[in-house]
Amino acid sequence: MPPHGEEPVPMAKSRVQFICQNCGTVHTRWAGKCDACGEWNTLIEEGTSGGIGSGPSGMRNARKGRAVTLTTLSGEIEEAPRIVSGIGELDRATGGGFVRGSALLVGGDPGIGKSTLLTQAAAALALRGHRVVYVSGEEAVAQIRLRAQRLNAAETPVELAAETNVEDILATIADGRRPDLVILDSIQTLWTDMADSAPGTVTQVRASAQAMIRYAKSTGAAVVLVGHVTKEGQIAGPRVVEHMVDGVLYFEGEGGHHYRILRTVKNRFGPTDEIGVFEMSDKGLREVANPSELFLGERSAKAPGAAVFAGMEGTRPVLVEIQALVAPSPLGTPRRAVVGWDSARLSMVLAVLEAHCGVRFATHDVYLNVAGGYRISEPAADLAVAAALVSSLTGLALPADCVYFGEISLSGAIRPVAHAQQRLKEAEKLGFGQAVMPASSEDKGGGQRSAFQPDTLADLVARIAGSKGRSTED
Ligand code: TYD
Ligand code: MG
């Protein structure tokens, strides 16, 4: 009998596996629903023989480990680590420019303007003397040239290729001076010889991204991967890439609106929650340096149901109008519809208004809209939402030069929020002389401004209701 340690190791068998195309979870058996993310019909059979998809069991006997040299945290760092494009809103979203040796994922709906943005960025960087390679797997060279002409970028020294095979791309860019920036549009079209699934599947996307990230790390070039998002708001396939890359930017916008927001979701080299704001024109994307003016543009001051929220996007204050419509409902179960905010949060604000302020919405439909198709995620918008709701219900317009911010707790108390000073400063800059804000927010700021600081939501409701007499007087 052979000694225990020398038992023959069973050979790794090539077996099939099913990979969820939404979240990347590997299943051994097919199922209608992925139990990891709960999506239906997302499991697709992919082979495991490709090496990359096969996981540790396939590599167990590959080779003995090689010792690497351990080093210290302090030490030399090569050249300026960032490549600045000069497009201010883009540099803001990336945290000060593309980082050399890093990989960035730019996600967004098809047609939102990712290729446009990156073509403009490529042109700007090439003009500054950087070597920029733009690889498109979606469009033919002629199409890209046509776009570049519209963008006034045709005469810049950007190097262009229409190619989808990762090995070919790597061989191409290895030629000549190391590129400063490589743009791959899009990750869903890339495929590598290392994996044998179809392009666009999780295995291919992951293997191709891995190869490009390895290229970035080993050469010091910055790599930008473009990824399309599915309807559900997740990057199909590339969602599994999110944790591999150093930064993730989402390019967003609402169908009917011409402005676009570049939102930082992940950044290993800078702050997240930053946004860059652009406007889409016939000549491409134009920077919007002062977003508040954009989101406040179409205000009609005298109408009830509108409140201006002083919000924050990362380090930048943004004023945006919140519009509410409360109308008697013909239905047994009244409607609640929200655009641009969280509907659960709206239910909470409605419940607090009912329970603690004696305001009844049970027989009314409630519609809430954030102007300009903008999306708010901050709880600080509670107070502005409540003010807009009460204003619409009572038919009493709120003062035109007043901003609102503050979080509402379930007890009806108004809780302080961060960055009160910056919010007030932005409001003042845009001509808003009044503010309704939490009592314990640092202080009133400038001092000359009139600030109402209610302790509870009921105080605010009483003030709005009490404005009736005042507004009829003048
Ligand atoms: P594109 O960058 O191709 O989107 P993506 O790469 O995210 O799929 O942009 C497509 C849309 O942008 C298309 O509907 C046309 C519009 N567009 C303009 O409005 N102005 C322009 O100058 C350009 C180039 C595109
Ligand atoms: Mg595109």
Image (spheres, grey):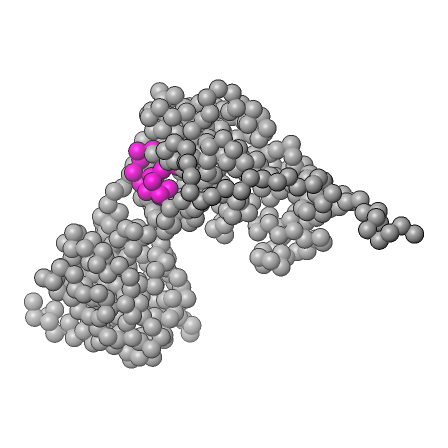
Lateral position of residue 389 relative to residue 19, left or right: left
* Magenta-drawn segment: 85-98
Q: In the picture, which quadrant includes the C terminus?
A: bottom left
Residue 434 visible somewhere in the drawing: yes
Q: Residue 134 appears at what percent x and percent y?
A: 45, 28
Q: Residue 92 appears at what percent x and percent y?
A: 32, 42
Q: Nearer the viewer, residue 179 or 30?
A: 179
In this rendering, the count of numbered labels is 0
Residue 108 visible somewhere in the drawing: no
Residue positioned 72% across, 40% down in the render: 62
In the figure, 209 relative to 429: above or below? above
Query: Where is residue 32, by image quadrant?
Result: bottom right
Residue positioned 36% across, 33% down in the render: 80
Residue positioned 81% across, 47% down in the render: 9
**Residue 319 sits inside the magenta stretch:** no
Q: Residue 291 appears at what percent x and percent y?
A: 26, 47
Residue positioned 23% across, 70% down in the render: 440
Lateral position of residue 196 relative to residue 217, left or right: right
Q: Residue 39 appears at what percent x and percent y?
A: 58, 56
In the figure, 160 relative to 275: above or below? above
In the figure, 465 relative to 267: above or below? below
Q: Nearer the viewer, residue 414 or 396?
A: 414
Residue projecting furthest to the left: 474
Query: Where is residue 432, by image quadrant?
Result: bottom left
Q: Nearer the viewer, residue 103 or 257?
A: 103
Lateral position of residue 423 relative to residue 351, left or right: left
**Residue 89 sits inside the magenta stretch:** yes
